[in-house]
Image: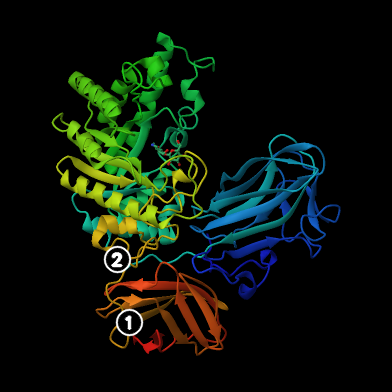
Amino acid sequence: MRALARLALATCVVAAPLTAVVAAHAADEPTPVTVLTSDFEDNTVQGWTGRSAETLAVSTTVAHGGTHSLAVTGRTATWNGPSLSVLDTFEKGTSYTISAWVRLADGSDNARLSVERRTSGTATYETVVGNTAVNSSGWVNLSGHYTLSADVDFLTVYVETASTTGSLYIDDVTASYVPALPIQTDIPSVKDVVTEFPVGAAITGAEITTEHGDLLAKHFNSVTPGNALKWDATEPTENVFSYTQADPLIAFAKAHGMKVRGHTLVWHNQTPAWVFQDATGAAMTATAENKALLLARLENHIRNVAAHYGDTIGTWDVANEVIDESQSDGMRRSTWYDITGLDYLRTAFAVAREVAPTAKLCINDYNTNVAAKRDALYNLVVKLKAEGVPIDCVGHQMHINVSWPSISDTEAMLKKFEGIGVEQQITEMDVSIYTSSGETFPAPPADRLLSQAYMYRDMFALFRKYRADLTSVTLWGLADDNTWLDTYPVARKDAPLLFDTRLQAKSAYWGVVDPSRIGGTSSPSASVSPSTSASPGAGTCAVTYRVTGSWTGGFQGEVKIANSGTAVISGWKLGWQFTGGQVVAQLWNGSVTQSGSAVTVTNASWNGTIAAGGSASVGFLGSWTGSNPVPAAFTVNGTACTVL
Ligand code: 9MR
């Protein structure tokens, strides 16, 4: 991957300079920066090519916006279509929103928006927008998110179809991103505060890069690859093993001295279909031959995957979600169970012990705070351990919400497994802001975020009390920008973790780290009523101004106001003068006006109160010419502050 400044872009795909692509915005809603626009209005193909021998030409037959579009004819395969290199446009670790309008010349089909990336000649294909119905009678929008997670030497965005190879049109293709905020480095690390056990986060590919990697390394000392070690990732085809997703995550963990939880060796989900097919390719039925075949596949899988990582993986979730408390025997009727009974568990644990003799071997499940489920899991663990099955640990997933479960039920869960010779781990904790699948909020309500903070506070207090039983606590995600709860149980934005979508600490974080600060200035969700308030003056406010990124003509900056006095600051206006002709184009965490060189920033609704000893930060994108000097003086509410 070439080193790129975020806005130093390939000329053929850039619509306009910085000042035109960022616009005025609401204080708490950052405006995306557009890095790619293809509208074909200049009568050129704007860098698009065919993936094979297709013909690409600008057309005025149909257009989504304006009068021109791109016509693609002569397609010879469904995966052939219009393609644009974004190698010089996309940066690793940045989440882009890609949007394209698609229309067929004739008939109907499904279209997909895809990415091809290559590293040293090895291609990987990723779906940005899955099959979407398209036809010849109108334009259809394909819009999705893409984060490049690897170093690449080839990177294209392309449009393909599912079953036909007819001609198609595309128009108004855009890609944009919301500028990342630097992580807060002046707050305590979760792992330094909670020292009774390792504290982990589940991660996916791009979360070891840039700001996400910084956040992970600052706060956590354990990681769980969220999907990369599952069967569909590690053995997609029989006896063909792949570690390309997991290896970088585990290398990052190793480099940062973090523990690794391996998730998971046996599960009924994310297991390829071939695993459960008999020798003829038909779905397995419960025969002795199929049982032997399935157990042999299981053994081969574990021998390879566990051996690949050796003692780097300190804990394995050997078996995941095997309980169904509504069954008389408490066992989930998965294909594993239907074909082998309990033998798949006996085999899995025995082989894992043999191949990874120093790893802790866990049986992991959700809703273990519910008495019936907890008891079914307990009965299974006691039974298997009595047989000598090497189960070292019970994993409680803890996918919970702001009002469920009770602390006492959770405590009963932990107590239940004491004294039977197992460690316990919290393996997948998150706290949904929703309490039913009927709710949807456009933005997380302040009261829900506050309840969430108290839930985190109370659960972590409980976990710390049970430190003799618990050997690890892991959250199912790093920050609210990437959570499985955005699509489960229905599609809606959730916010279940300690850091918000821009990686900033929430009240939930303070619930874990310092509950006395729940609702304080670092929590966008809620505010406390100040007991006293005052205008700050010299000695009572201190300002730090940092340029966090810079490129030809543009830069990103951050200004932090620290309340160094003893009274609460209640509402603030921050002022400074630029001396190099700089202009603020976009600002977040506040609202901005600029008159000549004088900049005034007013607090956002949620960060106006700065407790004594607290701080508030704003970030911005600006333009500059010639030089970009740092402003020398700052005021808060009209009074000069110390400049740090
Ligand atoms: O976080 C995972 C998500 O990205 C996958 O789409 C999903 C599909 O099965 O699995 C999620 O992880 C699950 C974990 O492996 C087991 N417990 C429940 C988790 C959330 O669904």
Figure check: 299 above or below 73: above
The reply to whether the C-beta atoms of the residues labelled 2 and 1 are less than 8 Å apart is no
Q: Amino acid at mark 2?
A: Ile
Residue shown at the point (31%, 88%) measured from the top left = 538
Name the outermost residue toward the top: 288
The local secondary structure at tag 2 comes to loop
Quarter of the image with the C terminus in it: bottom left
Camera-side residue of 565 and 500: 565
Q: Amino acid at mark 1?
A: Ala
- Reading the image, the residue beneath label 2 is 187
- Reading the image, the residue beneath label 1 is 542
Q: Position of residue 278 (x, y in %)?
A: 49, 16
N-terminal label among 2 and 1? 2
Residue shown at the point (47%, 27%) measured from the top left = 238
Number of residue marks: 2
Is 166 placed left or right of 420 in the picture? Answer: right
Q: Position of residue 203 (x, y in %)?
A: 40, 48
The local secondary structure at tag 1 comes to strand
Camera-side residue of 242 and 446: 446
Is 299 placed left or right of 515 in the picture? Answer: right
Figure check: 558 above or below 269: below
Q: Quadrant of ligand 1?
A: top left
Q: Residues within 10 Å of mark 2 (few under 14, many from 20)?
A: few
Q: Position of residue 531 (x, y in %)?
A: 27, 72
